[in-house]
Image: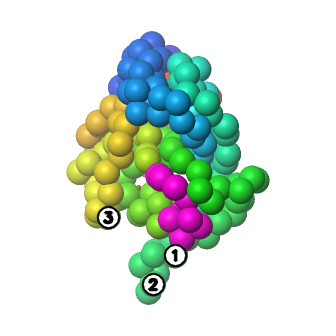
Amino acid sequence: MNDSIKEILISGDQITQRCKEMAAQINEDYKGKKVILLGLLKGSVPFLSELSKYIEAEVSFEYMNVSSYDGVESKTLVVKQDVEGPIAGKNIIIVEDIIDTGKTLANVVEMLYDRDVRSVKVATMLDKPEGRTFDIKADYVGFEIPNAFVVGFGLDFNERFRQLPYVGILKESCYK
Ligand code: 5GP
């Protein structure tokens, strides 16, 4: 285990097993349909890669890098990197690493509907329901976790720890 990690919360094997179950549900829901897996950069990449291995529906990949800022206007979404192909009329599954307040996701869903997509669903590896301040729910949730700051399997602390093959809790000495 990495020296900076206090505790492993979810192992790589658990994530793989859960991805198989989530993919089975997606296969059921999108039987005979095409769907775009829209990964939100950077954190969703390892989860997207694991989940997609078990999806049998016809999928293509797109990526977006967005930030949502707090401000006078509560919903400000900055698109740092946009999708490559056309998305109007398409079925989309947004793939996210973690949902906390739900702000990022609420903004992205609204923006996608403004672009006339056919349908939007959300798959997230982790969900912190206690942190929610925006009214948004994921359709496919890997694991619900308590309100702790976690890293690994795509999740970072100052760009570190994304490569860890598990989700863990950082030692306090790393940020104090
Ligand atoms: P939201 O908009 O739902 O509040 O925040 C979602 C984003 O916040 C995630 O994509 C992630 O970048 C970041 N985030 C929220 N909770 C955590 C956490 O526990 N660990 C890490 N590394 N990032 C988090």
Name the residue that disc number 2 marks.
73
Residue 31 on image: x %, y %: 47, 29
Q: Residue furthest left?
A: 130
Check contact, mark 1 vs mark 2: CB within 8 A.
yes
Q: Residue at x 47, y 52 (%)?
A: 120
In the rendered image, residue 92, in percent from the top left (x then y), is placed at 54, 48
Q: Which residue is mark 3?
A: 134
State the residue lying farthest toward the bottom: 72
Q: Is residue 58 left or right of residue 12?
A: right
Circle 3/circle 1 CB separation < 8 Å = no
Q: Residues within 10 Å of mark 2 (few under 14, many from 20)?
A: few
> Could you say whether the residue bearing mark 1 is in a helix, strand or loop?
strand
Q: Magenta residues, as a range?
A: 111-120
C-alpha span from label 3 to label 1:
14 Å
| Residue position for label 1 | 76
The colour scheme used to paint the residues is: rainbow
User: Sequence-wise, which precedes: disc 3 or disc 1?
Assistant: 1
Q: Quadrant of residue 61?
A: top right
**Label of residue 140 in the image:** none
Q: Quadrant of residue 6?
A: top left
Please give left or right for residue 74 compared with residue 66 in the image: left
User: Along the line of sight, which residue is nearer the eye, 164 or 95?
Assistant: 95
* Front position in the image: 141 or 146: 141
Decide: is 169 above or below 82.
above
Q: Position of residue 68 (x, y in %)?
A: 52, 67
Question: Disc 2 residue type?
Answer: Glu
